[in-house]
Amino acid sequence: MDDTIVAISTKLGKGAISIIRLSGEKSIEIVNKLFKGKDLTKVKSHTIHYGFINDGKNDIDEVLVTIMLAPKTFTRENVVEINCHGGIAPTLKIFELLTENGARIANPGEFTKRAFLNGRIDLTQAEAVMDIISSKTENARKMALSLVEGNLKKYINTFRDKLKYLLANIEVNIDYPEYYDIEEITKEQLKETIKNLEQDLKELIKKSEERQIIKNGIKTIIIGKPNVGKSSILNTFLKEEKAIVTDIAGTTRDIVEGKIIFDGIELSLIDTAGIRKTDDVVEKIGVNKSISLIDEADLIIVVLNSNEELNESDKYILNKVKNKNPIIVLNKNDLQLKINKKDLKFKHIVSTNTNSLEGITPLKNEIKEMFKLQELQEEDYTYLSNNRQLILAKKALASLKDAKMSLLNEEPIDIIEIDLKEVFDILGTITGESYSDELLDELFASFCVGK
Amino acid sequence: MKYDVIVVGGGHAGIEASLACARLNHKTLLVTGNIDNIADMPCNPSIGGPAKGIVVREIDALGGEMAKNTDKSSLQMKMLNTKKGPAVWALRAQVDKVIYKKEMLKTLKNQKNLDIKEALVKELLINNNKVEGVLLENGEKILSKAVILTTGTYLKGAILVGDTKKSGGPHGEKASNYLSPFLKKIGFNILRLKTGTPPRIEKNSVDFTKMQEEKGSSEDITFSYDSKTALAYKYQLPCYLIYTNDKTHKIIQQHLNESSMYGGYVEGVGPRYCPSIEDKIVRFSDKERHQLFLEPESLYYDELYLQGFSTSMPYKVQEEMVHSLEGLEHAKILKYAYAIEYDAIDSKQIKPTLETKIIENLYTAGQINGTSGYEEAAGQGLIAGINASLKLENKEPLILKRNEAYIGVLIDDLVTKGVKDPYRLLTSRAEYRLLLRDDNADLRLREYGHQIGLINDEVYEKFLIKKKQIAELTNILKETKLTPTKETNEKLKELDTALLKDSITLYDLLKRPKITMKDIEKIKPLNYCSEIKKEVEINASYEGYIKKATTAALKMLDEENKKIPTDINYKEIPNIASEAIEKLEEIRPLTLGQARRISGVNPSDIEIISVYLKKRGN
């Protein structure tokens, strides 16, 4: 109980605000490292402070930080709560930064448990409370296990088992140096193993980041010729949903217009300069910029005025996005439709207006459908557990890089093995399968040694 | 006549225990079944090897005898794993069994405060759960304040060959048949363990031309920090490598059921790491050959030890097996291989001090605790002797931690995890092996040896000088700066390392990959002995890894320093899982750290105990 724990206490993506909570002696110290604002180590207990969480280079989010000093807190330890915007990406980023700076990811029910263990809850109630805690933990554990027991675990074990054999082989080489029939692991082999492992781990991390959309948000650009209602659509979005940033420093103002939380997913909306075929040099630069954004976007929304027939500029734009799976928005549907839908050979076509907030509902539904946002929401738990795994997997990858470095520096094999063993142990933590004499068992099972 | 300490058994554990007590000025009696077998090596004629060799160094650092005696009797010394890193370097000696015994007996006989008596112990004298002496099989009672049991394989020892089973010790001596039933009666759980030894071959009957010679180091390496030379330097006897073959395997398979092991005559559990040759052939049937060594046993008799060929086959089959080996076609077997079974106590019933939990002032060490190996036994014997003495002196016991010594790892494993098969130390059992090196055993432990009183002031003074020199040299390297001059960079170019842009200390240069102290000396001559230079070099080269291990160890120590009071009643602590209560009651860990290592005790249980202790004000 000497360490500091951290957890996201609100359901990710739901609501406009996320709360990240820390408990433990170093809570304030850890947050202070990341906080741009007052020196939190000097503020009074039970006070709230405005500032930014900064990763050393960039501001991640604008936050309110509540400082509560022990013992008058829920856990009777120092508690810090960070209120940040509800977007999954900034919340997770802050969470990740906190773990990188010394906080440990809390186990399910651990805050409650600390409250009990620190005597916040009377001992006479203890048994009942512990029942709840243990059942909660047990359920969570089972749930986590059943999730992990899936493909991920099988997948990890395909390379963890190989690593186990290799490590046991190295151990045998160390403990039985004169068994010439037992293969002596060479640095060449290690190099090969590390290379393969690196690939596997990177793949694993990629898998864990399968829901990258959730993490990074959907980068959306809105294009169309001038005066078709791009800005109105953007503004309608911003009015209805919670806008978190309307102006990000360091980016070009005329490109990034807004970020919103949309069904728990961050949507970065980029309103582009109106595109039309032009020979004007200055205007051409702006148009080219808009066109270049098409390639970077996760989602392209092409806005057409349904009250106008397609002109050269429209056709130019439609041609640019024809292989990009865009959503074609026929805006101003309160007016007469003058576009022949048959001319539009696109899968996603919706018609909207911006007279009311509901006017853009068809567009929103289409986005949800396209990115299967409903499904992502239901997998919240999986996602979180993946996030824990992801952090562990990244740690394993870091240890692997240490091993690679040691190999490069021509360190002896038993030294390189220290890093590889770390990788092995971390992978074991992910699958929950490691135990203390695992390597010894492998050693005696696989290698013939004796007197 | 009343003794302070009685040690029962004159093997490697008993010797160290007796010497430690006597040297700490406690009137000590060593009781042994046969004085001629004191310091006997009934199995392999070697001492040391990975992990074990470091234990021997540790014994020496603490003021024990094994290293010194090995130096006096070694026939070959070899530093193993030299191609690997310094953490796993390990010294091993081939030892002359006769000289080893002779020299050790001399040491014991010359030791003040130490008497030796030939007898078998029948029972312990116990009053109020406190040991008060021993009762011999001849009815004689000898009183003492403490007793250390180091009975080896003699507790109900039985020798197995084929379908025969005979009560007795390794050389056909009388087994001790009363003591283990007595121990059982007073509450110890008795385990039946098994080990074995290979045949001994007459040297003159061996055709060495067909064998590969295995030599030791040509340098004069000693096990002890204080020995000036090793006998091995004079003799440098080789070992010989041979292999089993298809014929050998066929013979074994044909006769498998005639072996004691496969014939179902063995009750004891054999060691996983030391399978008999029949075990190897059954378990690793796809292996075409197994490697064997012929090792010299002594200058005084004509016997070679056939390492790797331990078996419990009948004599006739053993003959066939041995004759199937290349170079041994006409070999004469002087002693046949056998399996041996013996009783041991459950090591979970002893404390990290090696005092038993049931009987006060009763200590156990060596094979009785379920270990195997001369070195493991000696290490425990020394600790038991030290702790029995310290208790007599009303002093705090010596409990070595897992980051301090292999001996610490060994004892902690024994008392925390218990054993199922005979326990052997392996480097893989140590989580901080980079800290537990061959080169730094004295730096780790000499201080303790001196505090306790087993390292005298003169030796200690020498050690302090060494420490001082290491610090000095480190400082010189840290304070000497290299500036990026043309001259410097030319030298660095010669050393095949990156050239300087900014100035750098010599210490930082030494930290660079592939840069050794020898390279540093090309830049700045250093007037220190090789031992000092090696130490500083290791510290610099592996600084990152050493730091990592130290940090991990500190985290472990933090919990290791949280003592659990001996009168704790786990049943009174609400909310601990019942399985954990059972395990905690059985092992009664001394610290939170030890509690955490018990299988079946969960992290949440540890937290609850921690809070409970806080509330109690511990």
Image (tube, grey):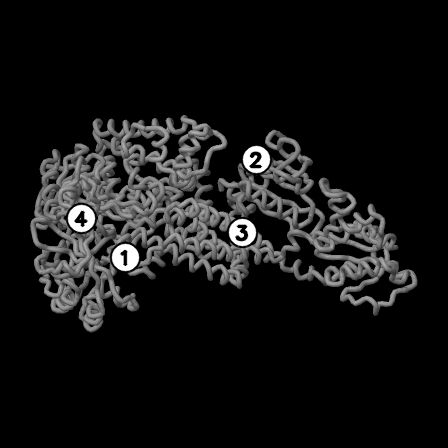
Q: Which mark is residue A29?
A: 2
Q: Label 4 sits on what residue type?
A: Gln
Bin the neighbour count of mark 2 within 10 Å (Cα to Cα): few under 14, some 14-19, many 20 and up.
some
- Reading the image, the residue beneath label 4 is B94
Under circle 3, the secondary element is helix
- Reading the image, the residue beneath label 3 is A133
Work out whether residue B231 can be spotted. yes
In this rendered view, identify the residue nearer to me: A38 or B120.
A38
Bin the neighbour count of mark 1 within 10 Å (Cα to Cα): few under 14, some 14-19, many 20 and up.
few
Q: Label 2 sits on what residue type?
A: Glu
Q: Are marks 3 and 4 on the same chain?
A: no
Q: CA distance from mark 3 to mark 4?
A: 59 Å
Tags 3 and 4 touching, CB below 8 Å: no
Q: Which mark lies nearer to you, 3 or 4?
A: 4
Q: Label 3 sits on what residue type?
A: Ile
Q: Earlier in the sequence, mark 2 or mark 3?
A: 2
Image coordinates for residue B276, horizontal then vertical, percent? 22, 62
In this rendered view, identify the residue nearer to me: A303 or B441.
A303
Instruction: Locate residue B277 relative to residue B565 in the image: left or right.
Output: left
- Reading the image, the residue beneath label 1 is A180
